Amino acid sequence: MKAKSAVQDNQYTRVADYYAGKSVFITGATGFLGKLFIERLLYNCKDIETIYILIRSKKGEGVEKRLQNIFDVPIFEKLKEVRPNDLKKVIAVEGDVTSPGLGIKDKDEQKLIDQVSVVFHSAATVRFADPFKTVMTVNFEGTRKVMDLAKNMKKLDTFAYISTAFSNAPRVAIDEKIYPPIKNLDEVSHFIQKYGTDEEKIGEFIGDHSNTYALSKVLSEHLVNEYRGKMPSIIIRPSVVGPILHEPLKGWTDNWVASTATFSNVARGLISMQYGSRDTVCDIIPVDYVTNFAIVAAARGKIVCRTDDVLVYNICTSSQNPITWRRASDLFLEESRKHGFCKRKAHNISFSMSPVTIEIVTLFRNTIPCLVADVGLIARGKKPWNTKEHLRAIWLRNLLIPFSVASWYIKCNKALSVISSLDDYDKKTFPCDPNSIKWREYLPIYCRGVKEYLLKDKCK
Ligand SMILES: NC(=O)c1ccc[n+]([C@@H]2O[C@H](COP(=O)([O-])OP(=O)(O)OC[C@H]3O[C@@H](n4cnc5c(N)ncnc54)[C@H](OP(=O)(O)O)[C@@H]3O)[C@@H](O)[C@H]2O)c1
């Protein structure tokens, strides 16, 4: 086991003090969670030494340009006002989790090995429709490569793997533990190579898992567990991650996660019925709660729960402060009506398990009105868009069926005990208690954030 300075600390160490003088390494830093990890660490842990971030070149943009793009996101405005020079603490490391050795240059690798105390491994493909081989290569094999680097880090206190609360979705009640392995991990790698594009074999391989993504995440958890003893690790399992609730910018999001797409499609009159029942719980957690919690857990998790085993923390709402899809969608819709999301009538969401009922209701409430709206646009010489977006909303609704028809009871007692171990200052600086979310306050913020940062001029 590597250095464990945090574990030996018996006195209360503030979270920012823990990070003072330390360097962290973040994968997935250009993503939704990743950007907020950078911002929250810089803003709240002002003496942090360096934040190394893994970035690949993409769509003709090199890593330095992509690094600058991160800072152009409005969540960094507050930091730029108070300590603009702190952005220089962020160092881009060129690499790709699918390349051998992460594709990192030797001199960069040595810096990471010598300096990094905490790794937040957040890189993943979260697109449910991506091919099996892509998902497994990025999410599963990529995790192995990041751990192979992390296990050599001389100062490593914590390797934090960002998983998902739905990694064990075949179970209805999900505890904060690693469940027994479902596959031999060496055979998984072999399967990806040999049958990665064989649809029939892939179907059998996925079995009763919700989709390839969820399977890739649970297998990665087992991989993290397999490395226990080689490095101190924690697993953070967020549920469906929504826009920022508090800081640094209420409502900010750049991610079309399941609930965001569903609520906005309802508010835009593109769908109005979903598979499931009116009582199905939608486990949403604001993105600032997830990043705050991960930052806190990496600093304090091993202090609160002294064990060499991998610690698992679920950061979610269903067991503590649940809300149903129906109520959340209604609160979002109520707010959207004040902001002109849609000229057509947008109906409150309803539920059924009958495909025939869903198709008939959708035809009259959404398909025909969308077609009529498009005819009107064409008649006025404008480009039609309603039917196209309506069909996309239906495609997405169907893709999300495994998550809309079932309720999960996802326990988070261990996460709560880490949160309750914080002093008042840290509780205020890193809000992350799921019990503190007031849905009537959050859903309107959610709605305004989606309009401002995602839909922009698409509300018509
Ligand atoms: N969003 C949610 O609701 C949610 C819920 C539960 C768990 N999670 C987990 O949280 C983590 C972050 O999710 P997110 O919502 O932030 O996703 P995201 O916005 O799609 O970001 C994904 C990140 O992974 C990076 N990435 C993908 N492939 C890569 C590769 N081959 N090499 C290097 N980096 C690569 C992306 O980089 P590029 O910009 O270069 O593509 C991006 O930075 C994931 O592990 C996800 O499973 C998310």
Image (cartoon, rainbow, N blue to C red):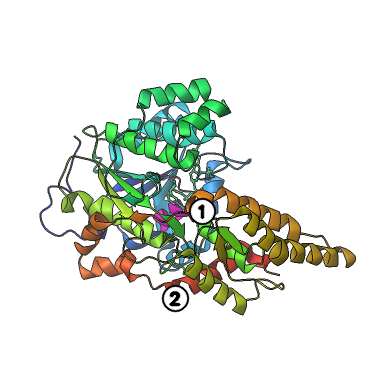
Residue lying furthest left: 10
Judge whether residue 20 can be spotted in this image: no
Give above or below for 244 relative to 313.
below
Q: Nearer the viewer, mark 1 or mark 2?
A: 2
Task: Locate residue 389: give its quadrant.
Answer: bottom right
Give above or below for 347 relative to 357.
below
Q: Which mark is residue 16?
A: none
Q: Earlier in the sequence, mark 1 or mark 2?
A: 1
| Point 26% across, 67% down: residue | 427
Q: Is 256 in front, or is 99?
A: 256
Check the picture and name the quadrant holding the C terminus: bottom right
| Point 25% across, 58% down: residue | 15
Q: Which residues are magenta?
A: 25-39
Q: Which residue is mark 1?
A: 70
Q: Which residue is mark 2?
A: 440
Q: Position of residue 155 (x, y in %)?
A: 24, 39
**CA–CA distance in space, label 1 to label 2:** 31 Å
Q: Secondary structure at mark 2?
A: helix
User: Which three-letter amino acid code belongs to the residue tagged 1?
Assistant: Ile
- Please indicate whether residue 114 sits to the left or right of residue 331 in the image: left
User: Which three-letter amino acid code belongs to the residue tagged 2?
Assistant: Arg
Q: Position of residue 392 (x, y in %)?
A: 67, 53
Q: Position of residue 370 (x, y in %)?
A: 75, 63
Residue 153 is a magenta residue: no
Q: Position of residue 88 (x, y in %)?
A: 42, 52
- Please indicate whether residue 445 sits to the left or right of residue 408 in the image: right
Residue 27 is a magenta residue: yes
Q: Secondary structure at mark 1?
A: helix
Judge whether residue 415 can be spotted in this image: yes
Q: Is 422 in front, or is 395?
A: 395
| Point 39% across, 51% down: residue | 89
